[in-house]
Amino acid sequence: MTTLYDQTLTRAQIMARTGSLAAFGGVRLMTLSDGLERGVRMLEFRTGSGLRFTVLLDRGMDIAEVEHKGRAIGWQSPTGFRHPAFYEPEGEDGLGFTRSFSGFLATCGLDHILGPEDVPALNYNYPRRATARHGLHGRIANIPARLTGYGERWEGDRCILWAEGTVVQAALFGEVLHLHRRIEADLGGDTIRLSDRVVNAGFQPTPHMFFYHVNIGHPVIDEGARYVAPLRDVIWASHAERYRAQGVGYRSLPAPQMGFAEQVWEHDMAADAAGHVPVAVINDRIALGIEMTTRKDQLPCAYQWQNFQAGHYVMGIEPSTHHVLGNNAARARGEMIWLGAGEGRDYVAAFRVLDGADAIAAAQDRIRAVQDQPDTDFPAPSGTFPPLTGRAQPPAQEVKDA
């Protein structure tokens, strides 16, 4: 059964009330046609509950806009949804990503995340290349997808809105990595479901790093909004030398500020009995929030990004495969993920809109049942990065000779 406009209806009852399901919800393909966004293909999802979101097919099949009953949840930067033809992966000393960075979800990877780095080119079967230069957060978020299908599918009296596509990150002599992505939402629902599989479609063992850069904007973030998470340890803060200088801790959000310098944290999250990690951003004043749920065994690390600068006002929830220490550190610690030929990794995430005080209270109860978070905005970072296990890493010589 489907709940739509405060009625629980069968498929036949819903279809009897319209000449087309598109009156209530569905998925449609559009193309942006002006400025730096010209030519970008976009899928629009409408669930009928008030949830509307868009998917940028030509930007890694990432989620662009998210809104609920006309209220924005996702963030947009001054760059707009820039066409990938204008992306500058090697520009500005590896920070070209910042000229294309916008939207609710930016996927980071597939062989590098975090800041620009030079790393050993162990996976390159090319004598001329001893090192590889990676820009901020890798390449995948600015590669067009091949759309393999989209639409609406009935399963009994349940209608699923869906889209699938493949994003290919490849280089001659280098990595051949495929991201297979499926996005779903239910007619009448308030949750976006994301399922990803990253596959090494080449024949060389290839390094793999991955995280979801989920960006929450106004009005969900505003003065007094809250970050709620099953946080058992604050591991690291990028701003340790000026920890209290800006007066902004991890829990409570300020109003936009002039000259705010970004802050990044790494937290150690607890998981529930099923291995799920729920994190929420909540605005009690307008009774609106968003809850993201991932799996600890897939994304064991968690960052929190705060950029409360006026005109760029945003906070990021960022579950990750690796610690914030970076690519070279992951290799040195024996924690780099090496995908063998044909090997893949799966990732799932769910984004639930918290509409109203009851939904917010239920989310808080779910999270607090997993782990109470520190009751101060400024817990001392422990500096303890738990070892990441279960990584299939071949010895360096084996990679060179493969």
Image: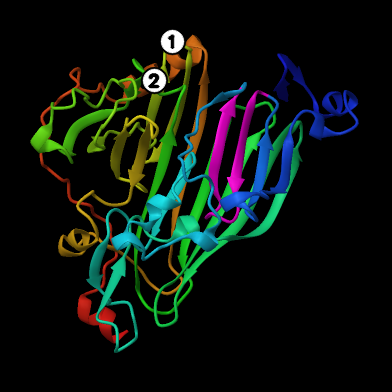
Q: Residues within 10 Å of mark 1 (few under 14, many from 20)?
A: few
Figure colour scheme: rainbow
Q: Is 372 rendered above or below residue 328?
A: above
Residue at image location 29% in from the left, 65% down from the top: 392
Q: Residues within 10 Å of mark 2 (few under 14, many from 20)?
A: many
Query: Which residue in the protein does label 2 denote?
Result: 222
Q: Could you say where residue 298 lies in the image, as x and y percent from the top left? A: 37, 48
Q: Is 354 rendered above or below residue 315?
A: above
Question: Toward the viewer: 203 or 71?
Answer: 71
Which amino acid type is shown beneath numbered disc 1?
Arg
224 sits left or right of 179 in the view: left
Query: Which residue in the protein does label 1 denote?
Result: 285
Magenta span: helix, strand or loop, mainly?
strand
166 sits left or right of 133 in the view: right
267 sits left or right of 87 in the view: left
Q: Image quadrant of residue 70?
A: top right
Which amino acid type is shown beneath numbered disc 2?
Asp
Q: Earlier in the sequence, mark 1 or mark 2?
A: 2
